[in-house]
Image (spheres, grey):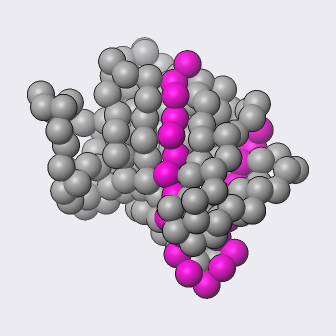
Amino acid sequence: MSIIEDNADEALGRRVRAEREGRGWSLAELAGRAGVSKAMLSKIERAEASPTAATLSRIATAYGLTMAALFEVASATSRLQRAKDQPVWRDPKAAYLRRQVFLHPANPLELVEVELPARQEAGFPASAYHLVRQVVWVISGRLTLMEGVERHELAAGDRVELGPPSDIVFRNETTQPCRYLVAIVRR
């Protein structure tokens, strides 16, 4: 398994800095665009802080990228990618595990598998969804998805297509972990 969490802070820090410097932005400019404090961005770039998924989502959106693009590693020459080589990342706050099943720059489709522990949640701002369309499919367990004020209760096998961009909260209100797949199409 290619666990990004083993060296996540360093790899993400390098990626965030490279994207910022490649655009010629200061930390203050990125902070303004992302809605993340300059101090936090500096800590992320120096690998002194483990950003949450919500923070990474805000940073990616400021760059015009999906969150997955911040995890992107050099693409393999093979169309086959073994499970052990798929990047995995754990959110430090919600402890959810995120596996990047599929991402390729030439293909607008992304596939992400998430395991959300019992009694945990992860929220994302509406801005994270203006570049993408998403479908969420529950593999096991139960998931409550708050799409703005609309509540979707999903069981294994259920799926929901997300509508226009709104704040989203993925919630596991049960005592068992929940696994779900997010299919993302970049616009």
**Quarter in which the C terminus is drawn:** top right
Q: Depth check: give the residue in front, 128 or 81.
A: 81
Where residue 156 appears, as percent x and y from the top left, is 58, 65
Q: Residue at x 48, y 19 (%)?
A: 25
Q: Depth check: give the residue in front, 79 or 70.
A: 79
Residue 19 visible in the displayed image = yes
In screen coordinates, is 171 left or right of 182?
A: right
Residue 41 lies, with reference to residue 52, above or below; the image says: above
Residue 156 lies, with reference to residue 2, above or below; the image says: below
In screen coordinates, is 96 left or right of 162?
A: left
Q: Is residue 82 magenta?
A: no
Residue 54 visible in the displayed image = no
> Bounds of the magenta span?
166-187
Q: Depth check: give the residue in front, 110 or 40.
A: 110
Where residue 34 appears, as percent x and y from the top left, is 61, 33
Residue 112 lies, with reference to residue 140, above or below; the image says: above
**Quarter in which the N terminus is drawn:** bottom left
Where residue 104 appears, as percent x and y from the top left, is 32, 28
Where residue 81 appears, as percent x and y from the top left, is 19, 43
Q: Residue at x 56, y 81 (%)?
A: 176
